Image (cartoon, rainbow, N blue to C red):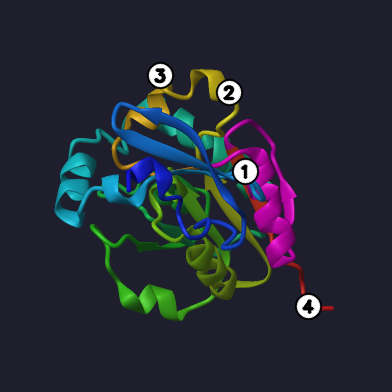
Amino acid sequence: MSELAIAPTRCSVCHAGEMRLLEKVGDVPYWRCTRCEATLMASSHWLDAEAEKRVYDLHDNNPEDDGYQRFLAKLADPLLARVPDEAHGLDFGCGPGPALARMLAARGMEVSLYDPFYAANPETLAQRYDFITCTEVVEHLHDPNAVFHQLDDLLKPGGWLGVMTCFQTDDARFANWHYRRDPTHIVFYRETTLRWLADALGWELDVPVKDVALFRKPAVV
């Protein structure tokens, strides 16, 4: 049986939707969930951990670069407008140069770090936080549903989760989209997908600018 005939058994984002083939780019099939509208690369084409890290090692995420700081400010500025002073946060998937954590710390926040490749600190996953940031992370996840539930557990009631990922908007341009061409990007989100996640987890969602989603976990009543 050809790979195209074998749809994923479930959507990795909602764990429920029926999958249909969106497009085959080269030899790589991409599947669309009919429920949450996530787009998934066929898992047989995922990189192994060593190859994935080699790609990340090539990224130039210099914390001192003004352009990179302006890019991260798309998330940092609206998040800082919502969290309390001197809040304690977690930069989840911080990478080798945690520029966002430094930016937030410079504004009075306490920021812990976690990254499976560069800051595998299990103790940081045993705490709860006022806010969590995930910049250019969720498109790499093998099981986004499980990770979003993990992040929900890590957030205090009333806490904020800030996600930055390039929203998938145009199917006609998907094959040539720069974001798809990164071999470590295996799941692509529409704003619809993120709203489905918010509803499923009982969160509020605000999209202050394109490619940034701010989720708020309800406070305890």
Q: Amino acid at mark 2?
A: Asp
Q: Nearer the viewer, mark 2 or mark 4?
A: 2
Look at 39% across and 57% down and name the residue there. 142
- Residue 194 location (% of width, % of height): 64, 48
Residue that carries the numbered disc 1 in the rendered image: 37
Q: Amino acid at mark 3?
A: Asn
**Is residue 191 shown to the viewer in this render?**
yes
Crowding near the residue tagged with mark 4, few <14, some 14–19, many ≥20 C-alpha atoms within 10 Å: few
Q: Are the residues tagged 4 and 1 within 8 Å (C-beta)?
A: no
Q: Spot the residue most to the right.
A: 221
Q: CA distance from mark 2 to mark 3?
A: 11 Å
Q: CA distance from mark 4 to mark 3?
A: 45 Å
Residue that carries the numbered disc 4 in the rendered image: 220
Q: Dot 2: what SS?
A: loop
Q: Residue 176 shows which numbered tag? A: 3
First of labels 4, 1 by sequence position: 1
Look at 14% across and 53% down and name the residue there. 50
State which quarter of the image contains the C terminus: bottom right
Crowding near the residue tagged with mark 2, few <14, some 14–19, many ≥20 C-alpha atoms within 10 Å: few
Residue that carries the numbered disc 2 in the rendered image: 170
Taking 99 as reference, is 154 left or right?
right
Crowding near the residue tagged with mark 1, few <14, some 14–19, many ≥20 C-alpha atoms within 10 Å: many
Q: Which residues are magenta?
A: 189-211
Q: CA distance from mark 1 to mark 2?
A: 12 Å
First of labels 2, 4 by sequence position: 2
Q: CA distance from mark 3 to mark 1?
A: 19 Å
First of labels 3, 1 by sequence position: 1
Say above or below: 90 vs 213. Answer: below
Q: Amino acid at mark 1?
A: Glu
